Image: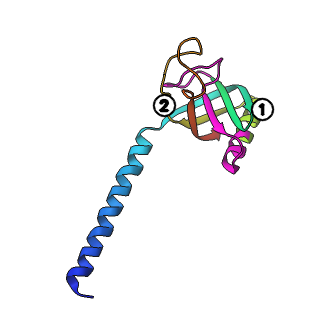
Amino acid sequence: MNDKLRNARRLGTAAGAAALLIVASQQTAAQEWAGSVMVNRVRLNGGTAFVGTTPQPANTCSNWGEHLTFDATTVQGKNWLAVFMTAKVSNRSVDVWYAPSSAPGTTQATSCNGAAISALQGVSLN
């Protein structure tokens, strides 16, 4: 393989890696965080979990007091459910990472529905 071809491949790999970093940072930038919130409510509907907290995290909506949602059928979702249940029964706070709602500040009476509730991206027990 000649040097020009080898250098072109390296440049392509570097450009691909840079594009990947840009996409990853954009995804992280869209993520919200709320620290030391208390779990008020955990509801399961089929395989979907809904969680309500106090205070209500910023840039979320409130559907009957529920602000966050996630798929509780996956391994990750089962782990998150265990963290929320532990926090609820032990009266401990959690930190949550989530995607902003498409209808922040609204309630079920306006435009907060299952599709608008913020998708959970991570949780930690305090």
Point out the image quarter for the C terminus.
Answer: top right
In the displayed structure image, the side of residue 11 where residue 24 appears, left or right: right
Label annotation for residue 52: none
Q: Is residue 66 left or right of residue 86?
A: left
**Magenta stretch, residue numbers:** 54-81
Q: Reply yes or no: does residue 44 show up in magenta.
A: no
Residue pictured at 73% horizontal, 31% vertical = 45
Question: Which of the two residues, 82 or 61, is positioned nearer the viewer here?
Answer: 61
- Contact check, label 1 and label 2, Cβ < 8 Å: no
- Relative to the observer, which residue lies in front, 59 or 34? 59
Report if residue 126 is visible in the image.
no
Q: Quadrant of residue 89?
A: top right
- Kindly identify which residue carries mark 2: 100
At 24% from the left edge and 77% from the top edge, which residue is drawn? Answer: 7
| Rendering coords of residue 119 (x, y %) | 57, 35
Residue 77 in view here:
yes
Which amino acid type is marked by label 1? Ser
Q: Position of residue 72 (x, y in %)?
A: 70, 41
Residue with the most extreme left position: 4
Q: Secondary structure at mark 2?
A: loop
Q: Would you place residue 76 above or below residue 9 in this image?
A: above
Inspect the image, locate mark 2, and give the three-letter code of the amino acid beneath it: Pro
Q: Badge 1 local density, few (<14 within 10 Å), some, or many (20+)?
A: few
Alpha-carbon neighbours of circle 2 within 10 Å: few (<14), some, or many (≥20)? many
Give the numbered dot on residue 90: 1
Which quadrant would residue 48 be assigned to in this image?
Answer: top right
Q: Disc 1 on helix, strand or loop? A: helix
